[in-house]
Image (spheres, coloured by chain):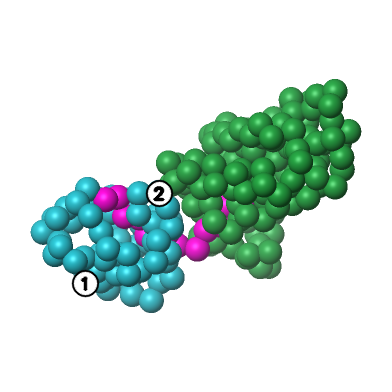
Amino acid sequence: MNASFVLTRARIDVGALAPEVRTDEDGAVATFVGTARRTSQGRRVLRLEYEAYEPMVRAEMARIFADARDRFRVGEVRVVHRVGLVPIGEASIAIAVAAPHRADALGACRHLIDRIKETVPIWKKEVFEDGAAWGGDRS
Amino acid sequence: MQVRVRLFAGLRERFGAEEILLDDLPGDATVSTVRAILESRCPDLRGLPAAAAVNLAYVPGDRRLEEGDEVALLPPVSGG
């Protein structure tokens, strides 16, 4: 497994990720894209703002990649997380996992997004028409 | 003993600073000591949930601190 992680303030080019990870040894590429949603807990969201503790994000991602390496047989893995302002409809995170077989590609992709949401020190602020809130729902 | 303290998200906003230096901590200071000092300066922080990290790794509240440590108080994360 060869894993890379990028934090960026720029728009994520979601379509570029899958071709970047795939090699001729892979029979499957799994991707996950998290996008900024218009509605949260019944309120209209104007935009999201993400804040990150960058050096710890990198340390935590290294631990998560090491754990995934023990659990799944995968090839190239890329994770891109956006910080700063994320307009509604644009991606906040994109993950691509290439593997010889689909079970490892899908399993590793699911494992990565679940672990990232649990432990990586990044925070989302939902900005509403009449206020703002950190966190949002946990689903 | 001196440590650097970093604050994020709602904790940062309520405290009004993203980073402070704490000097003259007792030699047996822990993460909980730091949290208590911040709460005494800013009572608004009381009751807010936060995990702690020292030098970029999660630690329990009773973790003893050392000179030069970077302590971070981390509200529940919500990335992804």
Whether residue B77 appears in magenta in the rendering, the answer is yes
Q: Nearer the viewer, residue A138 or A84?
A: A138
Chain of the residue under the numbered disc 1 shown in the image: B
Chain letter, colour cyan? B
Residue found at x 32% / y 69%: B62
Residue A15 image point, x, y percent: 77, 30
Assign the N terminus of chain B to one quadrant of the image: bottom left
Secondary-structure class at tag 1: helix
Q: Amino acid at mark 1?
A: Ser
Q: Position of residue A55 (x, y in %)?
A: 42, 41
Q: Mark 1 = which residue?
A: B40
Q: Colour of chain A?
A: green
Boundaries of the magenta span = B69-80
Question: Is there CB contact under 8 Å for labels 1 and 2?
Answer: no
Circle 2 sits on which residue? B56
Is B5 a magenta residue?
A: no
| Percent position of residue A125, x then y | 52, 55
Left or right: A55, with B31 as reference point: right
